[in-house]
Image (cartoon, coloured by chain):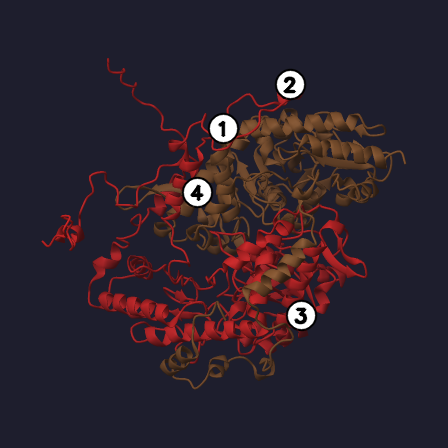
Chain colours: A red, B brown
Amino acid sequence: MSMSSVGRPTQPAAANSEVGFQSLSGGRGLLQDEPLLFELGGWDKTGVDLDEPEHDASDLGDLARTAPIGLAGLSEPETLRHYVRLSQKNHAIDLALYPLGSCTMKHNPRLNEKMARLAGFADLHPLAPVSTAQGALALIDRLAHWLKTLTGMPAVAMSPKAGAHGELCGLLCIKAAHEAAGHGERRRVLVPTSAHGTNPATAAFVGYSVEEIAQTADGRVDLADLEAKLGPDVAAIMVTNPNTCGLFEREIIEIARLTHAHGAYFYCDGANFNAIVGRVRPGDLGVDAMHINLHKTFSTPHGGGGPGAGPVVLSQALAAFAPAPWVVSGGDGFTLTEQDVGFGRMSAFHGQMGMFVRAYAYMRSHGADGLRQVAEDAVLNANYIKARLSAEMTPAFPDGPCMHEALFDDGWLEGTGVTTLDFAKAMIDEGFHPMTMYFPLVVHGAMLIEPTETESKRELDRFCDALIALAQAAKAGDAERFKTAPHLAPLRRLDETQAARKPRLTWRPEPITVAPAPLAAE
Amino acid sequence: MRYLPLTPDDRARMLGVIGVPDIDALFVDVPAAARRRDLFDLPLHAGELEVERELGALAARNRPAGAGPFFCGAGAYRHHVPASVDHIIQRSEFLTSYTPYQPEIAQGTLQVLFEFQTQVAALTGLDVANASMYDGSTACAEAVMMAKRVTRREKAILSGGLHPHYAATTQTIAHAEGMQIVRQAAAIDAEADVIDAIDAETACVVVQTPNVFGVVTDVTKIAEAAHAAGALLIVVTTEAVSFGLLKSPGEMGADIAVAEGQSIGNALNYGGPYVGLFTCREKLVRQMPGRLCGETVDAEGRRGYVLTLSTREQHIRREKATSNICTNSGLCALAFTIHLSLLGEVGLRRLAALNHSRARELRDALAAVPGVEILTPRFFNEIAVRTPGDAAALVEAMLADGVVGGVPYSRLAPDAGLDDVLLLAATETTTTDDIAALSAALNRRIGR
């Protein structure tokens, strides 16, 4: 072995790369097992310094808590270490391409974060006098203007807090419009089989019955089936466009025309708006209501499961039913109408203001020109992946281009003993987050890949090279690599069945079953 | 454009690999009538500096709560958040990750959620908590609908002390699902009135403590009455710091407790994003809405966490799901958990005691103003007062003195006939000088 002048080896020793190496502590180098907060901290430990209260709580009598809460505290350095260590067990967009189809995991600009933290936005109370919040209302108004212009729709309800909340808002507008017109008997909602689960869940939530619309062989809504199911009892259709197969509904204008001809409304799930922003306006397609996931198309962070934001653009027919609050522009500035408008109220305050600031910063950064390029690059990247991976994998809809996401089935895995799940887990070993699996339900063993526009060609190639190598390994009979994957993640495959069978949803101290040993004598 | 990595050369080569002549060839499925050739009538792209200027100018037109004496509460509270909370939530691995569908590479998020659920269950004195809802008001609506699933009854009784916006949200959402919502008239200290309204059709009663007027109530008797009729008691709390000082909903017999968690770890943000806390008794867990994180083991027997009981959820059960919720408030829950880890048992108790202490100081100052009548008999950190005239006009007048003197109740419920009622909150951020400025402003504006 060669050594430097201070006796330091200049080449790695062979043993370091040996598979099966065990550290003495059982840990994995810098990636250590991290106990729970409650195992690390103490009831008497704290990471904040607070003044001593001058008055006691004697006036509360027996309303005051006497029982311990059961919290654990940490000092500030321990807190940092605990949560930073935990963070290192996560995958993130900032680490690599994150190809979750239908989720639009694009880059989250840090300018957005900086703007949302300006005291004028972050430290603004929702019930502060309206005269002291004119800048916030102006921002909501500007964001609304952008959303209306980009979608070609005349109105927008800003308060829904996420996509599914937006769906609920849209359907409640539709329900209110039918009731106002004396058509409360319309109780059915038609939803394609390929829809997001939130669509039928939302329709059922507002008391509608849900009926599925069949799909054609080329992955689109079956017009004949739609026409057969439309009728005087149909309240709305809910169609995602581009749809969850990553395809644009070619007959979308006819779908809207048929729907309207039967007196129903057209709800569009806008989860995939990123594919068409700046090139197509949903208003031109005949849409009556559509939610926009600001955390997808407009780059606000997903944050490990929210917060999202789901403003809903509305057609003229539905605009009057938008829920409170309304931001109203007048001669003396903006006012808020907080009562007695539309179908009611979706949440306590005005919506996800922190997300509005981020989304608006993103829109302004891109501008009209940049947003159009966003859609083009998102679609280009997806088609590039589809073209490259088609050499080894089977696209679900090989004919024609896809939009922002490429859908594959598991036909190419037949006979390999490897499932879509196994393949996805093996992607982790190659440094990538798996794609969306087994969705949409209309494609067997579905693998839905959405790269977004914020990936470089180099990263796309790295991704395609990895998947092609994996596909070749599967076909070459290396099933073991897949069945036991992931090998190189912080944990191996987790037992989800056990978790559901006997749920442990909170930490509880292990019951002491043996008496503690007496302290050793000094 | 700084967010787009592809170069013109990349694009040309990629089109070549795909085998199409230009980008338009990838948009052929769009009907010709809907293809927009021209750029939309919106400004063109802007650099960071330009965007910062525009947003900075908008922000400057708002008056932040910290700019001077400030007493607004009514569902959102100004607290001090330690600097390390905001630092950690901006870690890329937390900020830019998705819902933890792939547990092997999301243990960071999942373990935090498990810690969050444990903290929330401890605070409320109940058995299980979910991984968060959008906010307190939507959590309240979801709780009411859960009561319908549990009891198979359709009537919900909302106390007159429930925040009017929570009541409106619940009425809108739960009514749409077919429930009958009975809203009792607004009253300062009348939580026990719900008892008389309970009947054999009642699925749940919803009671807030501290209520919208700041009144702290022992709900034990209400729980007994609800349970005797086969109904559930849902307890709502909009100020989560109060859990540090007050008897928990679970101790007093609540079946479901929901709360707004904004006070811990999260900024005011003009109303969102916030974080809804949702807890219940263990036997009700399969009727809960939202995501749940549970403990399990990996293939080598090591402890780990996964999203579990997902057969309740929309992506599996579709139209039979317990709720349509998908994205919730993950990052706000993280902020909540970090702040609460820093506080710990002793820190939260002291913070709560400090809030109460400041509110006692506020109460004494208000009581000394001629013409102001204290309406809240037992409070945590918020007090309702009767003012000699219109409370909204009084708040507007005090702005000229540099004081944001609370929330007029009429802002929340213009038709309640309580135009003279003003809600004022004090927190650990409220100083003696702030209270003195409020006293001076009130004295100046009342009696003129």
Subunit that carries the residue with mark 4 = B
Q: Residue at x 41, y 32 (%)?
A: A38
On the image, numbered disc 1 is attached to which residue?
A: B345
Task: Determine crowd level at label 2: few under 14, some 14-19, many 20+ residues with C-alpha closer than 10 A.
Answer: few
On the image, numbered disc 3 is attached to which residue?
A: A153
Q: Residue at x 37, y 44 (%)?
A: A85
Q: Secondary structure at mark 2?
A: helix
Q: Is residue A123 visible?
A: yes
Q: Quadrant of the C terminus of chain B?
A: top right
Do marks 4 and 2 both belong to one polypeptide chain? Answer: no
Q: Secondary structure at mark 1?
A: helix
Choose the circle earlier in sequence order: 1 or 4: 4
**Contact between labelled residues 4 and 1, with CB atoms less than 8 Å apart:** no
Choose the circle earlier in sequence order: 3 or 2: 2
Q: Residue at x 38, y 36 (%)?
A: A36
Do marks 1 and 4 both belong to one polypeptide chain? Answer: yes
On the image, numbered disc 2 is attached to which residue?
A: A58
Give the residue type that dot 3 points to. Met
